[in-house]
Image (cartoon, grey):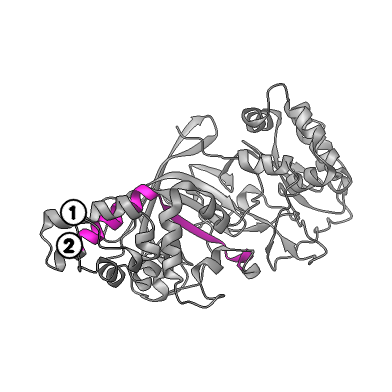
Amino acid sequence: MKIFLSIKSSLLLLLAGAVFFSACNKLEVAPTPLPSSQQTSPTLAELLDDPGFSLLKAAVTKAGLMPALSNTAARFTVFAPDDVAITASLTPILPPGVTPAMYIAGLTQVQAAQLIQYHVLPQVVKAATIGNRFPNFDYPTLLNPAPSVSPLLRLNSYPSVRPGVGAWVNNVPITAADIEAVNGVVHKVFRIVMPPSTDLWAKIQGESDLSYLRAAIARADSGVAAGARLQDALNIAVNPSSIAANLTVFAPTDAAMSAFVTGAITQALVGQGFPLATAQAVAGGLVGAFGPTIISNPSSIPDVPPIPPGTNIGARLAAVLTPTLAKGIVAYHIIASQSGTYGPPGLRVFSVNLPTTATTVKTLLNSAVSVHPGVTVQASFASPLPGISVVTGATVKGAANATASNITSADSHHINGVLHKIDQVLLPQ
């Protein structure tokens, strides 16, 4: 079974003192006071005296948050990994001889605060109030790494529940809910809940098997002014307002994209009079020789054998692999709001949020074609441990795909969204 929680890169960024960005929200983030008649014990801080929370208590202490969790006039929700969860999260990525306790002791106060604040909501959210709608509901955490920019900036977390299956925060299972304190509630979690540290564009730029997707975005943005490009919705450095974009991207791998491009070129050449065998040979040769450039800059492709001289294959490719086609394909791989006939981006769908029955959801393509059926998503679950449910398989299918695409690498969590790698290009028609 695939590991469903990837924390290595984020933890290494913490070790290096990474600076986290934050997403803007309009929800109230000040702690809600309790009635003065409430009892004064136990507080959330006192719950951490449980020996099973020794590592978490050490991190909270290092972060300087014990006074906040001791405040009986405030209310918080704490997603709390116990010692077993923290050890399981840290041990695989720590150098030999470095224990989780040593790692926590080595954090700076700022690093510890960033980590712990992402586990704390400034309001009480009991299990019964966590939504089970598709896909989830976002809650602001305490994490604001740039208060000098704005006191209202927060990173969100995404609690969700599926009746009869389980509950999660982001894609991390909640193992025990509603441990009550006078100033809030604790939900034990299966692993550390890592805050995102990079944007979607950095992820797409940094993955060696997403070069065709980068080329498709470049082709889609050809001739488009800065600020209106697809890249601008993914790139916080270029467009800070995209911090709150909250996207879900299905990212075809290079193997999937090269197969799609080979088929598209073959079909186009046959339509232009090439014999099928010749068209297949030409398409395979072009993709093998020029790769993503066929998408990003098709007009630059020269007439090379077995293409007859004077064919002007570059112009033919450019006529087929147009910016409009590239924009439509990319848009079809991004989930849009499901409200009304069409809504702007605003859904962060983790694999645990996918329905267990095949369900059609809208994509950004619906902004241009409102009646388009969208894509069909589905996930299956298993319980490897009592009280723990994990995704064992997830798929997404385009309207014109013969079979569903498998999500081969799920839940890459980023500041402005989540990315899932898939093994087929989604075909809208």
Q: Which of these two is toward me, 414 or 204?
A: 204
Within 10 Å of the Cα at label 1, are there few (<14), some (14-19), or many (20+) other Cα atoms? some
Left-right relation of 121 to 43: left
Q: Is residue 258 magenta?
A: yes
Total count of labels: 2
Determine whether 38 is above or below 343 in the image: above
Left-right relation of 319 to 235: left
- Can residue 134 be seen in the rendering of this structure? no
Mark 1 residue type: Gln
Q: Main secondary structure of the magenta part?
A: helix
- Can residue 36 be seen in the rendering of this structure? yes
Q: Which of these two is toward me, 115 or 373?
A: 115
Residue 33 picture location, percent across and down: 83, 58
Q: Residue at the location (65% across, 68% down)?
A: 240
Q: Which of these two is toward me, 291 or 209?
A: 291
Instruction: Specify the segment rendered in magenta.
Output: 242-267
Left-right relation of 224 to 254: right
The alpha-carbon separation of the residues under discs 2 and 1 comes to: 15 Å
Secondary structure found at label 2: loop
Residue 419 picture location, percent across and down: 50, 53
Residue to which mark 2 is pinned: 308
Mark 2 residue type: Pro
Determine whether 25 is above or below 289 in the image: below
Secondary structure found at label 1: helix
Residue to which mark 1 is pinned: 280
